[in-house]
Image (cartoon, helix red, strand yellow):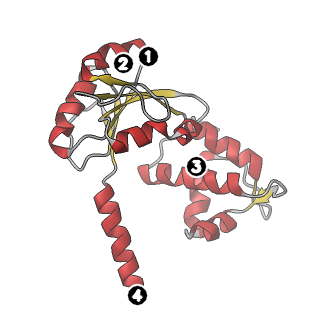
């Protein structure tokens, strides 16, 4: 299907659709937008519009062939190609992300972690940890395009600047700091404290 520009919100929903479809029993051949919407607690119209933007395989009354829809979503998300990444911040969170193998299923390969003074040379999972002095040469050698920041807020901008200077094009930020980057660099921030507060308030409102 011809590639189209889609919203950030749609991009955030596509992995949910993909995980749901892959989690269905093998004997499920066809799946409807209505069934997907119900399973994920989303609106029928929203799911139908989303799928229509990334797949032309919808069939009246039958819905989508599951395997074909999986393939369409994976092709749209480009999960079968691999993008290399590094982590700046070799603390517990950084090492946990380094050792998580599930990212490769989404096309992200985290090669190594970097810190000013790493306390160990490898994570428990065997991933290498290096001094920041090696960051630039490593990024150029392995054509690294994504940098992941897991340092405290007060060091986040410095870490970001170092990554940008190395030619990094996208930053996944796990620090609570707001990062300033050039226009050509993409930033995705994950504020764990905000997510936790939202979760607690939803729980409180249900009681």
Residue pointed to by mark 3: 53
> Which residue, given by chain and number where applicable, does mark 4 sit on?
207
- Closer to the chain start, of discs 4 and 1, is 1
The residue under label 1 is: 142
Kindly report which numbered mark, 4 or 3, lies closer to the viewer in this rendering: 4
How far is mark 2 from mark 1, CA to CA?
A: 5 Å
Between 54 and 206, the one nearer to me in the picture: 206
- Compared across the picture, whether 154 is left or right of 85 comes to left
Residues at marks 3 and 1, CA–CA distance in whole angstroms = 34 Å
Q: Are marks 3 and 1 in contact (CB under 8 Å)?
A: no
Q: Is residue 164 left or right of residue 143?
A: left
Q: CA distance from mark 3 to mark 2?
A: 35 Å
How far apart are the alpha carbons under marks 4 and 3?
A: 38 Å
Residue that mark 2 sits on: 139
Task: Work out whether residue 182 can be spotted.
Answer: no
The answer to whether mark 2 and mark 1 are in CB contact below 8 A is: yes
Report x, y in % for residue 154.
Answer: 14, 42
Q: Earlier in the sequence, mark 4 or mark 3?
A: 3
Residue 194 visible here:
yes
Q: Residues within 10 Å of mark 1 (few under 14, many from 20)?
A: few
96 with respect to 186 (left or right): right
Closer to us: 49 or 189: 189
Residue in the image at 29% along x and 59% along y: 193
């Amino acid at each position: 299907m011809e590639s189209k520009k889609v919203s950030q919100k749609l991009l955030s929903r596509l992995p949910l659709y993909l995980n749901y479809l892959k989690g269905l029993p093998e004997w499920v051949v066809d799946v409807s937008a209505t069934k997907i919407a119900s399973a994920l607690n989303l609106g029928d119209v929203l799911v139908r519009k989303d799928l229509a933007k990334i797949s032309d395989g919808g069939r009246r009354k039958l819905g989508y062939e599951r395997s074909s829809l999986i393939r369409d979503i994976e092709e749209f998300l480009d999960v079968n190609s691999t993008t290399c990444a590094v982590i700046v911040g070799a603390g517990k969170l950084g090492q946990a992300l380094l050792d998580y193998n599930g990212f490769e299923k989404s096309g992200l390969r985290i090669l190594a972690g970097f810190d000013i003074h790493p306390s160990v040379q490898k994570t428990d999972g065997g991933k290498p940890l290096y001094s920041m002095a090696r960051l630039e040469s490593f990024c150029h050698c392995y054509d690294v395009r994504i940098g992941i920041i897991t340092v405290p807020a007060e060091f986040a901008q410095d870490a970001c600047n170092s990554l940008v200077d190395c030619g990094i094009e996208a930053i996944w930020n796990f620090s609570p700091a707001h990062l300033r980057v050039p226009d050509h660099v993409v930033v995705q921030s994950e504020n764990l404290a905000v997510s936790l507060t939202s979760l607690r308030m939803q729980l409180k409102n249900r009681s």
